[in-house]
Image (cartoon, grey):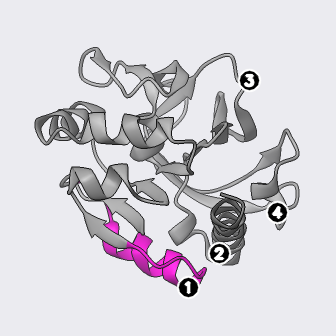
Amino acid sequence: MNVIVDYGLGNINSVQTALKKAGIDTVITDDKKKIENAEFVLLPGVGAFRDAIGLLKEKGLDIAIKKFADTGKPLVGICLGMQLLYEKSYEYGEYDGLGLIPGEIVKLEKEKKIPHMGWNNLKIKKDDELLKYLKQDMYVYFVHSYYAKSSNDEMLAYTEYGEIIPAIVRKGNVIGFQFHPEKSGQVGANLLKALGEMINDYISSN
């Protein structure tokens, strides 16, 4: 079973539709056991970190997601969902995240218009199976005011908007997309296609 986590924030239906087109059938649920026992989990998110982590903790979904991550199966966070994977955020205060990727979520520099909204190009930093259908400087769609600040050891691709912004990150089985692949046309579709192939390879080898 492939799961999209439903915790009250996120454009879940459009994400589910995009995944289905990529050959990834999912169920939308807030059932902790289904999350823990899934083959693949996607954590969506639109809104503020404070609200999102509060809802996850209120429902006990933070613990379920961490347990799932420990299985080694693919866990993907999109936009705010990616930011929740980090250790801490400073959006509207200081809040602990899921702690699955080292680093902090901080606000974009004021010199640029905030939020960073619209199309921007990806700079590929590392080879990875997720990027096999992507090429340098392909454009994807961003909407965010905060970004991940870390050692960048996990950064596969980035974009620039006053700062170097990690756009695709990966630490083992934990993956994050700062942009919205479901809104990024064929580039996003190709990324999700590669993700689907990665999920199938994992399932068939375990």
- Residue type marked 1: Lys
Say what secondary structure mark 4 lies in: loop
Which residue: 66% across, 64% down?
Answer: 195
Q: Residue 45: in sight, yes or no?
A: no
Task: Look at the image and give the residue range highlighted in magenta.
Answer: 9-26
Query: Where 112 sits versus 128, above or below?
Result: above
Total label count? 4
Which residue: 81% across, 45% down?
Answer: 123
- Residue type marked 2: Ala
Q: CA distance from mark 2 to mark 1?
A: 8 Å
Q: Are marks 2 and 1 in contact (CB under 8 Å)?
A: yes
Residue for badge 4: 134
Q: CA distance from mark 3 to mark 1?
A: 31 Å
Q: Position of residue 5 (x, y in %)?
A: 31, 56
Q: Position of residue 135 (x, y in %)?
A: 87, 60
Q: Quadrant of residue 83?
A: top left
Say what secondary structure mark 1 lies in: helix
Q: CA distance from mark 4 to mark 2?
A: 10 Å
Q: Is residue 17 magenta?
A: yes
Q: Quadrant of residue 11?
A: bottom left
Residue 171 circle label? none
Q: Residues within 10 Å of mark 2 (few under 14, many from 20)?
A: some
Q: Residues within 10 Å of mark 4 (few under 14, many from 20)?
A: some
Residue for badge 1: 21
- Of labels 3 and 1, earlier in sequence is 1
- Of labels 4 and 1, earlier in sequence is 1
Residue 189 circle label? 2
